[in-house]
Image (cartoon, rainbow, N blue to C red):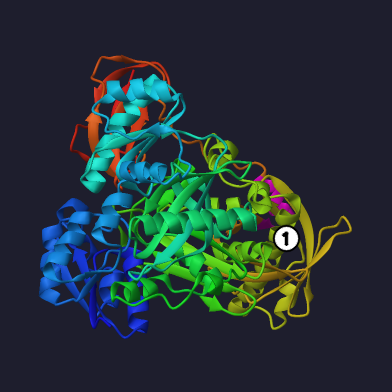
């Protein structure tokens, strides 16, 4: 077995590989850029080697720099993680030339399957059903428009060397095809160093289901079930689960056997994933094969008990698989939520800054449920603009899907993140959505259910009452603490009132609060009472309450006259006042937001790639104004209405902060 491996990656996947290597008694070497000098993966590894400036194309994807680190460290093998150089055959060849093992598939398999155009041709030759499309290279936007028209809109424009949603656009007409081709080409060049583009038919109402395969160099291959990855935003997976709530055993077996056959056809050896589009009739079509470890691999590990990183290392060491297909058993249900540094209230635009507070839920491994959090950050650390915005992958497992979903709800409510924008509220909203709960979702789920973007969650009446009761009970605790500190009266209970008005989400509840067996009983005055228990004390940012025997986890902040409470995707201002204060509160003026309708503000920290207009120019609704690049993704900002540009304040190459004025209008 290897004595030392180098991880040619960063963030949570580097930390994940280190954990398995440590378990196997293998020493690890991390590499890091200037931006990652104090990163978690650097701290966790046994050694760490600096490889360059923050930008990935000057550090993590520069083969010569990574190879220099391999030589310096004396590592016998390299695990590439995902992204970066994980599917780059030149990197695998460079390692082979140095006599260093690549913890991944053979070069020929990477070349055959890692390239999406080549892989589709091979799949077609192997009589694998594929999505209609044009597999040749596309030279320019005019050819892209012509091909798109021949295939028939809508079409998917994709980077051949792409992954993670980068270099990918959906076009519904000629204009979008022309624009999407250029953006995909630009993103592909900057992210992968390969700007080849292909086009395929975009299948409407699809489900994205992928098969995990594991093969060795001795001709053995198995599949470890499937993962449902249909909940996506901008072609980037957000929620994954295993198994799929849609597949039956026959379809699972057919997809699995086809995936293994395809892998064997190219001499595949390592862990890999074959992705399929599945329609409503359970017809499936090969999309691509990812010749690497997938981001969402933890859900497969949770339902199979197989450590995929460990298996990859053993296969790279020349060992045969020790399990057969009959040994693979799918047990229970697992769900993964990807926590991103992005603001769901600003159309999920990237967010950077310091993690002022980062407190994941406690990891648990019990027969009843499992909570797992794969992460690469820590409290006080910086979220950089240079890399993918994923902070963590929160996973839960339970014997049934319903129990796994409930465990995820509680884990999300317990996850504390402050200092940056993040998508925790949105993930909570997904977990409670009827379509997700029923398992009846497609890849269009987010676009269909939040067509105008995410603006928060409106809680139902039952949940509002539970939160109101909890807030009243917490307020009582705070009032008792206040009277104790004042020392004005020995019997502090008499100084705490029992009649309060709780206001939240436009609702008002007149309640009476009384003591009850270590908690409080809340009488709503309409015949409804709730018994609240918990160990919350003033200053705690997390309240674990029980309301009428049902657990409720609240993130709590103090505001004048009440609390800021976040739960189940809602962000609420909850006021707890006595009746007189509540009456006077009706006369308080609301703060009016400033008028920014004549300004184009930068919606995220990023780099100006292009300015499409000039001062004095009249622009029409929907017309591109400029392009901003952030976290390796290009974002085109468009005019919201007809206007005349009066001033342009930024130019290509400028780095802008959130809400910095890009241009002004008359």
Q: Does the magenta stretch include residue 582?
A: yes
Q: Nearer the viewer, residue 535 or 268?
A: 268
Q: Is residue 39 visible?
A: yes
In the rendered structure, the answer to whether residue 316 lies left or right of residue 450 reads left
- What is the quadrant of residue 397 in the picture? bottom right
Q: Which residue is drawn at 87% across and 55% down?
A: 526
Residue 661 x/y as whole percent: 30, 34
What is the secondary structure assignment of the residue under circle 1? helix
Residue 276 x/y as whole percent: 49, 47
Q: Residue at x 31, y 71 (%)?
A: 40
Q: Is residue 174 above or below residue 196?
A: above
Q: Does the magenta stretch include residue 59?
A: no
Q: Which of 447 and 86 is in front in this view?
A: 86
Q: Is residue 614 above or below residue 568?
A: above
Q: Residue furthest bottom?
A: 25
Indicate the quadrant containing the C terminus: top left, top right, bottom left or bottom right.
Answer: top left
Which region is colored magenta? 576-585
Q: Is residue 187 above or below residue 430?
A: above
Q: Provide the major secondary structure of the magenta segment.
A: helix
In the picture of the structure, the residue carrying the numbered disc 1 is 466
Q: Which of 369 and 564 is in front in this view?
A: 369
Residue 240 x/y as whole percent: 52, 56
In the rendered structure, the answer to whether residue 233 lies left or right of residue 643 reads right
């Amino acid at each position: 077995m290897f004595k030392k491996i180098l991880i040619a990656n960063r963030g949570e996947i580097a930390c994940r590989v280190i954990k398995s290597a440590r378990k196997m008694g293998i020493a690890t070497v991390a590499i890091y850029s200037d931006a990652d000098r104090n990163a978690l993966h650097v701290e966790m590894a046994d050694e760490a080697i600096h490889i360059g400036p923050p930008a990935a194309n000057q550090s993590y994807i520069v083969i010569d720099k990574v190879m220099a680190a391999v030589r310096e460290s004396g590592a016998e093998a390299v695990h590439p993680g995902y992204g970066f150089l994980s599917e780059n055959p030149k990197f695998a060849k460079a390692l082979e030339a140095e006599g260093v093992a690549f913890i991944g598939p053979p070069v020929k398999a990477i070349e055959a399957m890692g390239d999406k155009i080549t892989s589709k041709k091979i799949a077609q030759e192997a009589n694998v059903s594929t999505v209609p499309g044009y597999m040749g290279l596309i030279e320019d936007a005019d050819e892209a428009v012509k091909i798109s028209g021949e295939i028939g809109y809508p079409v998917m424009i994709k980077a051949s060397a792409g992954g993670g949603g980068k270099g990918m656009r959906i076009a519904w007409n000629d204009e979008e095809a022309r624009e999407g081709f250029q953006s995909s080409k630009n993103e592909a060049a900057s992210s992968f160093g390969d700007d080849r583009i292909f086009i395929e038919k975009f299948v409407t109402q699809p489900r994205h289901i992928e098969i995990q395969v594991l093969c060795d160099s001795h001709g053995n291959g198995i599949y470890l079930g499937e993962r449902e990855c249909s909940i996506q935003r901008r072609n980037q997976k957000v929620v994954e689960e295993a198994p799929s709530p849609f597949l039956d055993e026959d379809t699972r077996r057919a997809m699995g056997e086809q995936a293994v056959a395809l892998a064997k056809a190219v001499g595949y050896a390592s862990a890999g994933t074959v992705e399929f589009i599945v329609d409503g009739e359970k017809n499936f079509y090969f999309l691509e094969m990812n010749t690497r470890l997938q981001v969402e691999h933890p859900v497969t590990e949770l339902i199979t008990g197989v450590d995929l990183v460990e298996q990859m290392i053993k296969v790279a060491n020349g060992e045969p698989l020790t399990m057969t297909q009959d040994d693979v058993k799918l047990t229970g249900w697992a769900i993964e939520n990807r926590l991103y540094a992005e603001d769901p209230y600003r159309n999920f635009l990237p967010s950077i800054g310091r993690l002022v507070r980062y407190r994941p839920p406690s990891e648990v491994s019990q027969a009843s449920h499992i909570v797992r959090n794969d992460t690469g950050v820590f409290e006080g650390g910086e979220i950089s603009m240079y890399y993918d915005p994923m902070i963590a992958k929160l996973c839960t497992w339970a014997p049934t899907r319903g129990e796994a979903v409930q465990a995820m709800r509680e884990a999300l409510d317990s996850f504390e993140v402050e200092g940056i924008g993040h998508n925790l509220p949105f993930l909570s909203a997904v977990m409670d959505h009827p379509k997700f709960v029923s398992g009846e979702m497609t890849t269009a789920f987010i676009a269909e259910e939040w067509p105008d973007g995410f603006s928060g969650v409106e809680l139902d009446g039952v949940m509002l009452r539970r939160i109101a009761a909890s807030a009243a009970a917490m307020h009582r605790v705070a009032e008792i603490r206040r009277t104790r500190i004042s020392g004005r009266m020995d019997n502090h209970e008499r100084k705490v009132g029992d009649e309060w008005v709780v206001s939240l989400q436009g609702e008002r509840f007149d309640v009476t609060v009384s003591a009850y067996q270590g908690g409080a009983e809340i009488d709503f005055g309409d015949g409804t009472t709730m018994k609240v228990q918990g160990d919350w004390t003033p200053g705690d940012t997390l309240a674990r309450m029980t309301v009428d025997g049902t657990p409720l986890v609240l993130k709590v902040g103090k505001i004048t006259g009440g609390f800021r409470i976040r739960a189940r995707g809602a962000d609420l201002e909850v006021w707890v006042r006595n009746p007189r204060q509540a009456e006077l509160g009706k006369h308080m003026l609301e703060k009016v937001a400033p008028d920014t309708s004549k300004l184009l503000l930068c919606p995220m920290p990023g780099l100006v790639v292009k300015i499409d207009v000039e001062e004095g120019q009249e622009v029409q609704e929907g017309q591109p104004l400029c392009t901003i690049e952030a976290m390796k993704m290009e974002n085109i900002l468009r005019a919201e209405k007809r206007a005349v540009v009066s001033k342009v304040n930024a130019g290509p190459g400028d780095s802008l902060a959130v809400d910095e004025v890009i241009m002004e209008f008359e």
